[in-house]
Amino acid sequence: MEEKLIGNKTAEQWEKESPVLADAASLRETFWINPHYKKGNPELSLCGVSPADMDDASNRLTRFAPFIARAFPETAKDAGIIESPLREIPGMLDFLKKDRDVQIPGRLLLKCDNLLPISGSIKARGGIYEVLAHAEKLALERGMLKESDSYDILLEDSFRKFFNTRELAVGSTGNLGLSIGIMGAKLGFKTTVHMSADARQWKKDLLRSKGVTVVEYDADYSKAVEEGRKLAGPDCHFVDDENSKTLFLGYSVAALRLKKQLEALHIPVDAEHPLFVYLPCGVGGGPGGVSHGIKRVFGSNAHCFFAEPTHAPCMLLGLVTGLQDKVCVGDFGIDNKTCADGLAVGRPSSFVGGVMDTLLSGEVTVSDEQLYYLVHKLADLEDIWLEPSATAGLMGPPGLYGTEAGKAWLGGTDNATHLVWATGGSMVPAEEMRKYYEMSDIAS
Ligand SMILES: *Cc1c(COP(=O)(O)O)cnc(C)c1O
C-alpha cells in the first residue's frame, strides 16, 4: 500500500526535514521560530485587512457602546466598551524562572480577557463584534437606523421584532458559541449554535437558558462547522470562524486599546524595549486578529508568538508545511484531544495562516499536564483563575529564553515586556474550575 501524502511528501519525509514536525507528531512540547517572518514594518494592507478597516471596526464598537451599556449593565462602568484589564504577574514570573530553570529578563504582564464582560473570553471581541456588525447592516439597509443615532434604540421592540425574523448560526468548541449566542439572543435573532464534542455542558445549558438552539455533535470543531454551514438557509447569517474578516477585525481592535493601557502604565514599546506577546491559538482568528492589530500599532517593535496544545497544533502544522488548511493534525497521527477545549481545532484557518505567515515570530506547544499545572499555579500565586486553554501563552517566555532556537533568535534582548494573553475563564462555574485546579495534583 502506498503511504499517504501530505502535500507532496509523506509524514516521515516532513518530519525528517523539519524537526519541529517530528516533535509535533510525537506530542513533544516544542518551540519554533518562523523562518518566513519579515523584518521591518509590515505592509498590512496586503493581507486584505487594512488599518482603515481596523479604525472602522473600532468606530463601530463605539457606536454600539450606548446599546451595550444598557443591555449589559456590567459594562456600564466602562460606558459600554467591552475591555479587559492589564495586570503585572511578578509571582508567576518568579515561578516560571525557578520551575523551568531559565533566566527571563523583563516584566511579565497578563492581558485578562478572562474578565471580558458578557461572555468571559477573547470571543467577546470578535464574536460579539460580528453579531453587532451584522445587526447594524440589516438595520441600516432597512432604514430603521442611522449611524448618528444613539444605538440604545436597538433595545426597542421594533428592532427585536425585526431581528426575530432573521437567523444567525455558528459552529463552535464553546466560547464562540457563547458570545454569538448571548449577543444574538439579546438583539432578538433566531440563533443556532452547532457545538463540537469538546464543548462543555455548562455552556450548552447557559445558551439554552437564553433561548438559543444548541445542536450537539459527536465530532470535532471542523465537523460542527461543516454541518452547521450545510443546515444554514439562504437567509441565515453563518458566522464563519475559519474565514471571517469581520471576526478578525473585531479582535484586532484590542491592539488600539492595549496601546493606551501600556501608555497609562508608562511601559515603553520601542526598539530598545520590545513587546513580546504570547497568544493561545485554536483556528487562528482570535490570536491572528489581535496580532495583526499589534503589528499595525507597534510594527517591528512587537513580536507575536502563538501557543497551541501538543494534542492540537494545527496552526503550527499549517505554517511549517506551508499547506495551511490542506493539512490537519490527524495527518501527523495527532488526536486533537485536549483539555484546552477552546484550542481543540484540528485544521487551521487558511485566511489567518496566510496573514500570519510573515507576521508571526514563532510558536510554542504545551502539554495538557502543563496547562493544568499552570491553572493551579496561577490560582495559588496570583489568585487568577483561567480555563486551561487560556494559560498556554505562559509557556512562551520559557520557550524563548530556555531553548536553543529561542536564544539564538533573541541574541541578548533583556529589556523586553512579556505579555501573555489570558483568553478565558471567568464564566467557568466554580465547581468546574475546582476540577481544573485539582487536575494538576492528579497529573503531577
Ligand atoms: C477561541 C479561543 C482561543 C483561540 O481563538 P481562535 O480564534 O480559535 O484561534 C483561545 N482561548 C480561548 C479560551 C478560546 O475560547
Image (cartoon, rainbow, N blue to C red):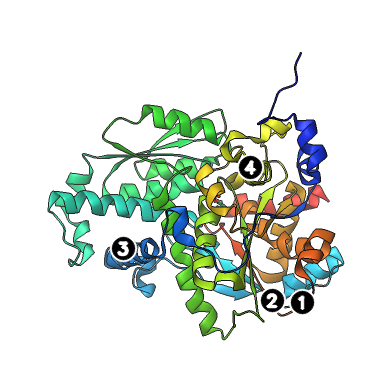
Amino acid carrying mark 1 in the image: Pro
Is residue 351 or residue 150 the one in the foreground?
Answer: 351
Residue position marked by numbered label 4 in the rendering:
322
Q: Position of residue 156 (x, y in %)?
A: 17, 56
Amino acid carrying mark 4 in the image: Gly
Relative to 196, does residue 122 appear above or below in the rendering? below
Assess disc 3: are there few (<14), some (14-19) or many (≥20) residues with their C-alpha within 10 Å of its C-alpha. Answer: some
- Please report whichever mark, 4 or 3, sits nearer to the chain's N-terminal start: 3
Residue position marked by numbered label 3 in the rendering:
60
Residue position marked by numbered label 1 in the rendering:
105
Q: Classify mark 2: helix, strand or loop.
A: loop
Q: Contact (CB < 8 A) between labels 1 and 4?
A: no
Q: CA distance from mark 1 to mark 2?
A: 7 Å
Q: Contact (CB < 8 A) between labels 1 and 2?
A: yes
Please tell me whether mark 4 or mark 3 is closer to you in this view. Answer: 4
Please tell me whether mark 3 or mark 2 is closer to you in this view. Answer: 2
Is residue 152 or residue 335 the one in the foreground?
Answer: 335
Amino acid carrying mark 3 in the image: Arg
Residue 382 appears left or right of 251 = right
Relative to 440, does residue 300 appear above or below in the rendering? below
Residue furthest to the bottom in view is 266
Q: Which mark is residue 416?
A: 2
